[in-house]
Amino acid sequence: MAPPPAPPQKSPSPSQPSGKSEVSDLKLQLRQLAGSRAPGADDSKRDLFKRVISYMTVGIDVSAAFSEMVMCSATSDIVLKKMCYLYVGNYARCHPDLALLTINFLQKDCHDEDPMIRGLALRSLCSLRVPNLVEYLVAPLGAGLKDGSSYVRMVAAVGVLKLYHISAATCFDSDFPAVLKSLMLTDPDAQVVANCLFVLQEIWNLEANKSEEASRERETLLSKKLVYYLLNRIKEFNEWAQCLVLELVAKYIPSDSDDIFDIMNLLEDRLQHANGAVVLATIKVFLHLTMSMTDVHQQVYERIKAPLLTLVGSGSSEQSYAVLSHLHLLVMRAPMLFSSDYKHFYCQFSDPSYVKKLKLEMLTAIANESNTYEIVTELCEYAGNVDVPIARESIRAVGKIALQQYDVNAIVDRLLQFLEMEKDYVTAETLVLVKDLLRKYPQWSHDCIAVVGNISSKNVQEPKAKAALIWMLGEYSQDMPDAPYILESLIENWDEENAAEVRLHLLTAAMKCFFKRPPETQKALGAALAAGLADSHQDVHDRALFYYRLLQYDVSVAERVVNPPKQAVSVFADTQSSEIKDRIFDEFNSLSVVYQKPSYMFTDKEHREPFEFSEEIGNLSLGQESVGNARRYDESDKDLLLSTSEREENGGPNTNGPAAAGYSAPPDYNSSLVSLSSQTQSETAISDPGMPKHTSQMTLAIDDLLGLSVPAALAPPSLKLNPKAVLDPGTFQRKWGQLAVSISQDCSISPQGVAALTTPQALIRHMQASSIQCIASGGQSPNFKFFFFAQKLDGPPSFFLMECIINTSSAKAQVKIKADDATASEAFFALFQSALSKFGVL
Amino acid sequence: MPVAASAIYFLNLRGDVLINRLYRDDVSGNMVDAFRIHIMQTKELGTCPVRQIGGFSFLYMRISNVYIVIVVSKNANVACAFKFVVEAVALFKSYFGGAFDEDAIRNNFVLIYELLDEIMDFGYPQNLAPEILKLYITQEGVRSPFSSKSSDKPCPNATLQVTGAVGWRREGLVYKKNEVFLDIVESVNLLMSSKGSVLCCDVTGKVLMKCFLSGMPDLKLGLNDKIGLEKESQLKSRPIKSGKTIELDDVTFHQCVNLTRFNSEKTVSFVPPDGEFELMKYRITEGVNLPFRVLPTIKELGRTRMEVNVKVKSVFGAKMFALGVVVKVPVPKQTAKTSFQVTSGRAKYNASIDCLVWKIRKFTGQTESTMSAEVELISTMAENKSWTRPPILMEFQVPMFTASGLRVRFLKVWEKSGYNTVEWVRYITKAGSYEIRY
């Protein structure tokens, strides 16, 4: 441990010495005592040592007294010795020359008759961490591993790991791993065994990538023989060592189902252990062992429920937090698991906010048909909570539940009641939610719009909420009598609007409103476009310019772009891919679960330079790397994410569906994006010379446009699918047998698609998002087979059935479609293809 | 790697280091500054006990006026790390004999350094059991230079004890009077809706023991829990005696309890550690007897007056009584003046927590008591910000009462020397989080 490189102590308290005089004073006193054999000498030494250590603790450099401390170390007082060891361990690394002085007495202590002293000396010797002193370590370590006292062996085992971290070569040359291995299998003392185990685990894990032998050694740590040996002794280990053993067992690959049941029977009682860490480790073993046995896995979930709920309620809030994070992970995998225990997740007034937040997430996750009413009622209680972040969180939770459920009737009423609470933050959160709800359930627009229309835009200040309100004003302007006028007043205050997000929405809403109620909006649109063009924000400027040119080019095209027929959003983006979730699950019982990301995202940089950290603090980099990592990951996973999501944050709601194609500007426009704003302006000037006349000319142009008859909107896509189609396997099989093949086609798959298909689950989920359900799938790389089905949304129930055989090695897919209504199968095939291409397969 | 910690820091509320111990090299540089700048000096403090700063994870806990911070650079085992801190604090407390706070740390820092060395090595928890550590880490620790070293033999013995078959108890204990104290301590959690219906309620209970027994005694505890009784009647093939049986939702035991035997025979048998320990913990959600009913009526009379009326009924046996009953009724911040009328106890307005606090020292069973208060408010401009009524909180202790109805049926002590023992059993029910909305 190095003394901090930065100024050690910024605000020393008055009792601390200010300069070197105290240190030299200490030195003097120590020197006087060094040779003293007087009866009271040890007591005075103790006091002096205490002072030295307390200075060291607060960060004052007392390394100057090193030689005096070493001189005083010749004592039989064990407490004095410990303090001296502590001091030496602290300064040895930055004063290697001085550390050499201590070797002598430490080596001598390693031969003391008292095992306690032998152990302590050995531990300190290994903790010096001075690379050029490793030669002095080998002999005492070797002796320590063979010591008659288990205490010394225990310390020596860990010493080997410390040696490994200082000099791996020395560690291997002395053949310590082999000694540890035999010790692990034979030592009568369980703690020695446990220490050998984690030392070997750590060494072989770090070495595994370097040599084949090491990775073989790592394998043997997971061999049946060793695992059973440890399991049979599990009760001898203390609670912490049990955690280690259980962690190892969780990685063990059982040979057959008997193996699995044997282990589970043996460990069943660990679920009743008082130490929560042991219980969680046991749960991990159970979950991982039964991964391949669906039925048993379900039973395991039932079995672990009670212990988990106990863990939530017992111990400190921090412990509850750790357990709740794990519960949340489990609930995501098995939502039904806790659906009847929802009351356990009601927030207590005294819970800290981090616990409340997780409880809210749990309540959201377990809400289903049977408990929604109670859960939403409870959540509504929290909306008035004093703790504003929690109040917001609970409103969001209500919204999330609404988006999950079929029956949203009651929830919509509740949400609308929130708007009547007349609290700014409640209104803000609710508006955002109502917007999302309307995107999924347009049928509620009537009820919602009536209430939303009564909200004064002056009471809404938060950008997100304001944007949501403006979106609704644009989208439902035909149902809100005041919409054009509210928009107009908002546009008048354009300059006071700080958030670009809001200005972007204003532009779009003005456009939408214009096409629905032209005479009333015309003036406002003109003002909005003018203000947008003059806007300093690049995106706002670009969008205004884009709309302007679009209107100039062709009004009917503009309308198709701005007001396309919209499909209700069936599934909102899941922020994490199933692959990530699986990785987190693999790392159960670790920080990954708390952070909700796999460990490589936050521990990537393994070997940091000692001082790197202080620089990072200078940059105030709050978890910079991890953010970067996450982003990188996002990119690699982009295809998947984009296809399942309507990415709204940046593009505004009009970017989804067919409009997306219209939104990507023509190439020449793109090039102007790069140019500076002055250039853009000159470009604009080409079409309408003279900036001052800009507005008036534009209004004129729009007047002209108004004269044109607006053509009917483009015909909607010929086929819409029911997002909630249901078909049981029996019916599917019967239909498949009865119907004739209407389309049979081969297509080729892109290499990217082949890569994406390494997890067929992802394809299935993606298809689901496109309202094409998978009823069965199977196969092993390179051959996959999927059976999909879909149902027409309108008209009499009409199903499409499909068999899709994909060979990833030849990159070919073979598709067979059968349909109730064979005439529509072409359209369905087109839909399927477009969905596939969005996934990146075609 | 299930590392629990790379370093551990003890800081006071200003962020000064009281004690630190670096176990692994992967954590270096000035972590304390990072903690101060990114956690202590921001609003983030207390929003989450696990934070990541520049590739390092900070797991922290506040205990009285001390922050205990664990820093790791790897993917650590969180549950284990927090449990380690909790256990370590319990260990320190058992050494200091009481409070764990800044002063206690300053006064005992050498001892804490010693302990930190023993309880964790290179980031892996070793042994935290106080009964073992006390054998070889003593506050005195002086080896008199005049006494011969050979007489100092507990050490090798102690190290054997660390992991022996009965690691939690050493042999050769002798007591003149063999006594066992058993306490069943329950805390009732309640959440009552404003309509007076129970939203959720449960009991978490602990069985605490204090053993002063000679030799290596075997103990067997029988409770009136359903599974245990059924099993017993099965074994003895006689029907369960009528009377209340309790269904335990979940039980955890001290490591001394023979879990194999619990699973097969459903009896709690164990060789107890010497002194004080927590034998078992349990949780119950069905059939909870709430000791108190609270009936609040709160009227807002216009903008500046409130009328608060709270009636509390005790519903436990008339021969029992509750101690330290406190009812806290939240009132708005702008409270100016209060006046009270109580049928028992004393009530006053506590401005620092914005509550009317009503205290009753002794509350007999099957009685009721009321408090009526008038609250005058300062009229403010922010009228439309209606007051969010936080729940009424209640504290109490009811000796000789268990909210779950759990009872000890027997406690048998068997030792080969066949001595007689005296067993003492106590029950107490406390309020956990007892919240009543209105």
Image (cartoon, rainbow, N blue to C red):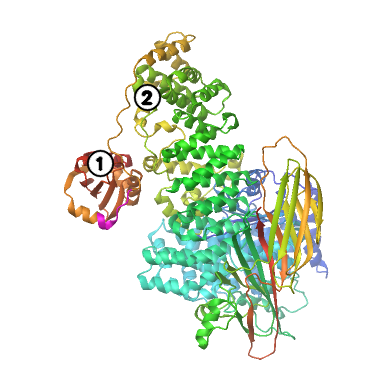
Q: Is mark 1 on a helix, strand or loop?
A: helix
Picture residue at 50% right of the left edge, 46% below the top: A411
Picture residue at 52% right of the left edge, 29% below the top: A502
Vertical placement of residue B13 versus A824, above or below: below
- What amino acid does circle 1 point to? Phe
Protein chain holding label 1 = A
- Which residue occupies the foreground of this view, A213 or A644? A644
The residue pinned by badge 1 equals A828
- What amino acid does circle 2 point to? Glu
Q: What element carries label 2?
A: helix
Is A728 inside the magenta-drawn segment?
yes
Res. A79 image quadrant: bottom right
Vertical placement of residue B359 versus A805, above or below: below
A605 to the left or right of A127? left
Of the numbered discs 1 and 2, the one sitting upstream in the chain is: 2
Disc 1 crowd, CA 10 A, few/some/many (<14, 14-19, 20+): many
The residue pinned by badge 2 equals A559
Vertical placement of residue A698 versus A226, above or below: above
Picture residue at 45% right of the left edge, 67% below the top: A249
Magenta-tinted stretch: A725-731
Question: Can residue A528 be seen in the rendering of this structure?
Answer: yes
Vertical placement of residue A336 versus A675, above or below: below
Protein chain holding label 2 = A
